[in-house]
Image (cartoon, helix red, strand yellow):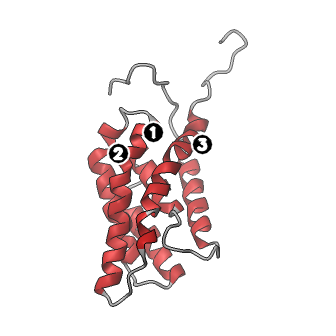
Amino acid sequence: MIMPRGQQLLLPVNPAFIAASLVVGVAFNMLPLGRVAWTPDALVLLLAFWGVHQPLRVGMGLAFVLGLCMDVQQSSLLGQHALAYTVLMYGTRRTHRRVLWFRPWSQALQMTGLFASAHAVQVLIGLLTGGGWPGVGVLFAPLFEALLWPLASWVLLAPQRRAPDPSDNRL
C-alpha cells in the first residue's frame, strides 16, 4: 500500500502489545465506576482501533469472545455485547483501508458512525428483550469515543514509531 504523504513508516506491532491493550480495556470496563449510558466503552475503542490498524490479527471472532466476557461480567443478555462488537468489527473490516488515509481527527469523524452502530445494536437488543430506554445520554457515548480516538491513536501507535536501529548518527 502506498503511504500518504508525510506519514511515518511504522514498525510491525508486537502481538503481545495488542493482547495487553485489550486486557487493559476489559479491565477498565470491569471497574465499578457506576456505568451510565453516556460513558464510553474502552473495549469498543480498542477493538475498533486494532480492527482498523491490524485487521488480520484482531477480527470478529476475538470481538465476539470479548463481547461474551462483557455480557457475563455486566449480567446483560448473553450475546448483546458480542453482537455489538461483531458488528463494529465488520464495519472496521469494510472501511479500514479508507480510514487509514486520514489524519486522526478525520479518522475520528469516520469512526463515529461505527461507534454509533455498535451502541445502537446494544440499545436495540435491550429494547427488543423488554429492557427500558437507557435515556438520551446513550447518544453521547459514540461522540466521546470519537473524541478519544486521536488520543488512542497516539498512545497505541507510539511503540511502533521508534527507530528500528538506534544510532548516534541518525537524526
Callout 1 amino acid: Trp
Q: Residue furthest right?
A: 168
Residue 60 in view: no
Residue 19 coordinates in the image, percent (x, y): 55, 55
Q: Secondary structure at mark 2?
A: helix
> Mark 3 — residue?
155
Find out whether the residues at labels 3 and 1 contact each other: C-beta distance under 8 Å: no
Q: Residue furthest bottom?
A: 130
Residue 147 on image: x %, y %: 50, 49
Label of residue 110 in the image: 2
Q: Is residue 69 left or right of residue 30?
A: left
Pointer 1: residues within 10 angstroms few (<14), some, or many (20+)? some
Q: Which residue is mark 1?
A: 105
Q: CA distance from mark 3 to mark 1?
A: 14 Å
Q: Is residue 125 above or below residue 64?
A: below
Cα–Cα gap, marks 3 and 2:
19 Å
| Residue at the (68%, 21%) spot, across then down | 166
Q: Quadrant of the C terminus?
A: top right
Is label 3 or label 1 in front?
Answer: 1
Which label lies toward us, 3 or 2? 2
- The residues tagged by marks 1 and 2 sit, at their Cα atoms, a distance apart of 9 Å
- In which quadrant of the rendered view does residue 102 lie? top left
How many marks can you see? 3
Q: Earlier in the sequence, mark 1 or mark 2?
A: 1
